[in-house]
Amino acid sequence: MRADGTPLPPGESPLARALAGEPVDPSVWHVLRPDGTRIALRCTAVPVKGADGQVAAALLRTHAVDALPAPVLDASRLLAEAGALLGASVDAEARLEPLLKLLVPTLGEGALLVLRTPGGAAGEEALRVAASLHADAGRHSLLRELLTRYPLDPSAPGGLPGVFVSGAVGRLPILSEEHIAAIARDAEHARLMREVGPHGCLSVPLGARGNVLGSLMLLRSNVLRVFGAEEEHFLTELAHRTALYLENARLYREAREAVRQRDEFLGIASHELKTPLTPLSLKVQLLQKQVVVLAREGKEVPTERVAEALDVVQRQVRRLSGLVDNLLDVSRITAGRLRLELEELDLASVAAEILYRFSPAAAQAGTELGLEAPVPVVGRWDRLRLEQVVTNLVSNALKYGAGQPVIVGVEAHGTLARLTVKDHGIGIAPDDLARIFERFERAVSDRHYGGLGLGLYITRQIVEAFGGTVSAVSTPGQGSTFILELPRGDIPEEWISAHAAPGPTQGE
Ligand code: ADP
């Protein structure tokens, strides 16, 4: 290859020229060794003619000359500049492009900053090019085109992307024709790689607090300038600092989001807590006035009026204490203080009891409540917490059930107890199904339905403390079914098989 690192076309090598009959004067050529290092050779080539006067061979004389001087690297200045750049904004990602400008063209002709993006539902890894730069304007656009049309695939064999995920330092002495042939996805991909030109690459991990966020990659078109240990050390340090800034920016974003959620929740909570207070204080004020007026007339307040007012007061106080209990539960759960007192219980009886408690409210709303629990389903659970879970699911079914029938089913599946609550109400959009079990998450407007968005969160936490699961299936506009599955605890196997539910569920 030439002194600037560009490969030599086959016909231009000293040997080829001598074989073609041309004496080659002493000149310096460079050879890339398989380990990525290179040597400079001074060569002379002379054609050797045969008896017929034709060139039959070539005499090649070579000897090694001193290596090229290593470029001067002012690491501390570059690190200080990078720190000032990244620290100038809380959004470190917006500063990545200028960061690459510190490296290009001083240390290499091109640079890329690749970030891992959290895996999707299937947990597959994805990579995103957060910044890219090439000193040559034409190659800069080609590089962008290459990265946009052929996104990096961490699982692709042979390529560097795997390094972005593994957190290892990767080196590619040169993106040779053979390498292109091995990794190109199609002819167009190969063409773009060729047009960007042969480059050597050094890739270092963006590691912060034990996480690999991605990779910083330096491209060099002068492949004679092998990446030295000092450069690798500098780049690793720069990548580490960049990763810390990126990680801090992410934590800052998360903290802001948490504060936003908390403020939103405080707004909803104050509204929810105030709602029962209005009828409560109105009733008390009215009763007070009546007492005063009637006392002036020397009369007593009729018992029915007091009883009716106390009824309202009691209902609203119950509602208030329910809300406060929910808030206390959340702080207990967050602090890991959810304690369970296990005892032997029949889930079918618990469900029947809760439905009985809801029957006045259901009758008032004109909602039919049904229970399908053919046999007792015994397990070891905490009574109050189990009641709380069933209450949450049934009260939601009534609240969002649009007055349509609500059916609660209880059955045994071997060592699992299953309770389902089925309504025919507004339903839940597929995108909201997982979210509604999170803290403060709601999938309805607070103008139409009151609530703190805590019931299902608390439900899931309790169910998980029992070692079980809660999930929902739903068709928007047609209703939802919430499914609770609880291990039955240390109930003897023989007892379970002796009391197994009859019918199709047996032995499942
Ligand atoms: P809240 O009912 O106080 O908002 P929950 O945690 O109990 O809080 O429920 C969270 C969200 O889940 C509700 O806001 C609602 O959007 C949705 N949801 C819960 N149960 C049902 C149901 N049976 N039908 C439709 N949507 C429901």
Image (tube, rainbow, N blue to C red):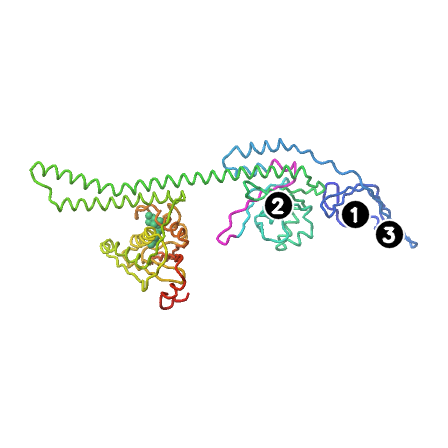
Residue displayed at 35% across by 45% down: 329
Q: Say which residue label 2 marks.
A: 168
Count of marks overlaid on the render: 3
Counting residues from the start of the chain, the first of labels 2 and 3 encountered is 3
Q: Nearer the viewer, mark 2 or mark 1?
A: 2
Mark 1, other Cα within 10 Å: few <14 / some 14–19 / many ≥20: some
Percent x, y of residue 69: 74, 36
Residues in magenta, as a range:
100-123
Q: Secondary structure at mark 3?
A: strand
Given residues 208 and 415, the one toward you in this image is 415
The span from disc 2 to disc 1 (Cα, nearest Å) is: 37 Å
Q: Say which residue label 3 marks.
A: 57
- The kind of residue tagged 3 is Ala
| Residue 341 against residue 253 in the figure, above or below | below
Mark 3, other Cα within 10 Å: few <14 / some 14–19 / many ≥20: some
| Residue 3 against residue 417 in the figure, above or below | above
- Furthest toward the bottom, the residue is 503
